Image (spheres, grey):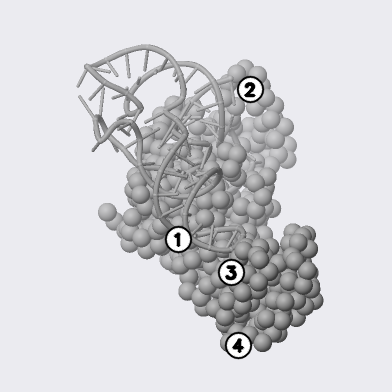
Amino acid sequence: MSEVRCRFAPAPSGSLHVGNVRTGLFSWAFARHHGGTFILRIEDTDSSRVTEEAFHGVMDSLRWLGIDWDEGPDVGGPASPYRQSQRLEIYRETTERLLAQGDAYPCYCTDEELEERRAAALARRETPGYDGRCGTLTQQERAAFEAEGRSHAIRFRMPEREWVTTDLVKGEVRWAPGDLRDFVLVRSDGSPVFLLAVAVDDLLMNVTHVIRGDDLLTSAPRNAAVIEALGGTPPAYAHVPQVNGSDGKPLSKRHGSTSVEAFREHGILPEALMNYLALLGWSKDAETTFLSRQELVEAFDLGRVSRNPARFDTEKLEWMNNHYIQGLDDDDLAARCLHFLGVAGLSPEPALLRRAMPLVKERMPTLADSVSLLRFLFSDDVAPDEKAAGVIGKAPEGYLAGVADALQHLDPWTAEAIKGALDERAAAAGLNRTKGFQPVRAAATGSTVSPPLPESLELLGRERTVERLRRVA
RNA sequence: GCCCCCAUCGUCUAGUGGCCUAGGAUUUCGCCCUUUCAAGGCGGCGACACGGGUUCGAAUCCCGUUGGGGGCACCA
């Protein structure tokens, strides 16, 4: 096989959602698996929907996830530029050529006329779609429209024959003659449309495999037709199913934050998101659950991509995320938690934060959970919540004061010694470990849920611990 | 309305005619461990959408039905 060249071509309108990026991940993994080239191309021909922030956001999200590219808007490459908005001249020249060859023609139909005919076709129970009438206009008729002052779009003359695409995921798909209508290449304002830009760019960038969402399945023959008209050979296509929300409906704002950026801000690890996404619609075998970036590249195969759409399951993502969190070493984990604690207004002392990691790593589905788990350590605002106050209220008279006294002079101040002292006070009060520890936990952390108590108090320090117990007592 | 794609536990999936009493993961439930919460260990519940064929034999092949999804844009 000649060199494999794949591309990911997002439209930078809004944020990159996980369904999109999963498609990009497959494309990337396929290219890397075959030792090929991965191209990032920005499809921003519809200037009204594009923002500069989204353009940078797309690249940030991909980099964060670990998807790298060899050619793209920032790194350049032999087919520069890689933003469609900067390739307008290329599209213009191509359009001239298609026009000259008779593969495209000006269309003078107005929106109103088009809409009227669409409605009429529907009423006749026919497939709506352009009827091709401007394709047979005479020179005189065109002149008449021009004289009228009508503007025109440019349409591609779709050859009326059966179209067959052998999709690498879906298999052989056929369209009968007439199913595919003449489509617009250039808007009446002169701007190119996706169907032109994609075909031209895939041809010029020598893309060999187009891996994209299956909502684009019917544009495969259209893309191929334009490429053929330009004398090129169409790439192979692989249309992967969409990712749906937990309700089975296509991902949308209704499903809350589904962008890569949102998961990042919720404390999902990039390695976890990549692993989860890789297994959404693809599998290595019957058993494999965890895959590193390298293992994914080694194993990825389009033949094992599922044909049916998958639902995004946040619970499983978080389970997997916790698995990766547990695998991080303490320094790394502490560094990653720092950002989230900072956002919550806490400014942890680095050494203390690092020592706290073993206590919390198996209790955090996400990095953001470090905030609720460790607030007691980095803030002295630990007023007991409702449950904690209840537990404190049920403690025997003078119990907490007694614990404070015992801890006041404890030596050494270690988790082991603290545990011994707590056990002793609990036994003296006739309490079992649960009943004895909970009031102390509530007073020291403000909550009935915390990391293991003796270890937590060791980190908190004698002074702060005793002070908190006395304040509550 | 027309065209196309799809259909295994709640969810992600394994399965390509006999290895299937349908496997794994997650979720959920129970037990163990246990200072709370987790994590971990063990175990349980849980699926081939339906109806016809083909075949000695069907989750696997064919047809139909139903149900999802996509397309039919001067969006991408």
Check disc 4: other Cα within 10 Å, few if <14, some if 14-19, many if 20+: few
- The crowd level at tag 1 (other Cα within 10 Å; few <14, some 14-19, many 20+) is many
Q: CA distance from mark 4 to mark 1?
A: 63 Å
The subunit letter for the residue under badge 2 reads A
Given the image, on which type of amino acid does mark 3 rest?
Answer: Pro
User: Is the residue under label 4 in contact with that under label 3 (CB below 8 Å)?
Assistant: no
Q: Residues within 10 Å of mark 2 (few under 14, many from 20)?
A: few
Disc number placed over residue A122 in the picture, else none: 2
Is tag 1's residue or tag 2's residue first in the polypeptide sequence? 1
Residue type indicated by callout 1: Ile
Q: Mark 2 belongs to which amino acid?
A: Leu
Mark 4 or 1, closer to the camera? 4
Q: Position of residue A451 (x, y in %)?
A: 60, 68
Residue indicated by mark 1: A39
Q: Is residue A444 at least partly visible in the picture?
A: yes
Where's residue A346, x and y in %? 70, 75
Label number found at residue A411? 4
Of the image marks 4 and 1, the number of the one nearer the N terminus? 1
- Amino acid of disc 4: Asp
The residue pinned by badge 3 equals A452
Q: Give residue A363's position: percent from left, percent from top.
A: 56, 63
Q: Secondary structure at mark 2?
A: helix
